[in-house]
Image: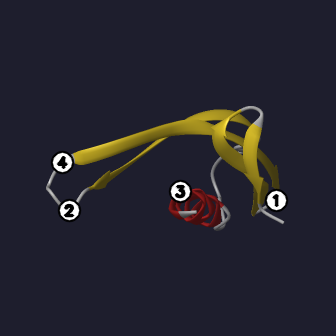
């Protein structure tokens, strides 16, 4: 469940207005966070994005067949 929240947070961040480029497509993504013991934990996945003007929607997750939708 914690990982799902992380992915949704990334998607919300990507949903902010984008002014320069169309980000529609399939993206390989990597997130990282510092663990309590000081080590850096990395996680990778895939994001399927569609941009309509300044609105970005899509889904993301650990793989093509395992994603979380924005709605």
Circles 3 and 4 in contact, beta carbons < 8 Å = no
Q: CA distance from mark 4 to mark 2?
A: 7 Å
Label 2: which residue? 36
**Residue at the image point whose x is 14% and y is 57% from the top:** 37
Q: CA distance from mark 3 to mark 1?
A: 29 Å
Q: CA distance from mark 3 to mark 4?
A: 17 Å
Circles 1 and 4 in contact, beta carbons < 8 Å = no
Which residue occupies the foreground of this view, 2 or 22?
2
Label 4: which residue? 39
The answer to which of marks 1 and 2 sits earlier in the sequence is 2
> Within 10 Å of the Cα at label 1, are there few (<14), some (14-19), or many (20+) other Cα atoms?
few
Q: CA distance from mark 1 to mark 2?
A: 40 Å
Rendered location of residue 71, percent (x, y)? 84, 66
For the question of whether residue 57 can be seen, the reply is yes
**Residue at the image point whose x is 44% and y is 41% from the top:** 43
Element type at mark 4: loop
Element type at mark 2: loop
Q: CA distance from mark 2 to mark 3?
A: 16 Å
The answer to which of marks 1 and 4 sits earlier in the sequence is 4
From the viewer's perspective, tell me whether residue 55 is left or right of residue 44: right
Quadrant the N terminus occupies: bottom right
The answer to which of marks 3 and 1 sits earlier in the sequence is 3
Q: Which numbered tag is attached to residue 3?
A: 3
Rendered location of residue 42, percent (x, y)? 37, 41
Element type at mark 1: loop
Q: Which numbered tag is attached to residue 53?
A: 1
**Residue at the image point whose x is 73% and y is 45% from the top:** 67
The answer to which of marks 2 and 3 sits earlier in the sequence is 3
> Within 10 Å of the Cα at label 2, are there few (<14), some (14-19), or many (20+) other Cα atoms?
few
């Amino acid at each position: 469940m914690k990982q799902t929240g992380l992915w949704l947070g990334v998607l919300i961040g990507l949903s902010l207005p984008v002014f320069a480029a169309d980000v529609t497509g399939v993206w390989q993504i990597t997130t990282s966070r510092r663990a309590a013991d000081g080590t850096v934990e990395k996680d990778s996945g895939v994001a399927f994005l569609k941009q309509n003007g300044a609105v970005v929607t899509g889904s993301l997750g650990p793989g093509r067949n395992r994603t979380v939708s924005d709605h």
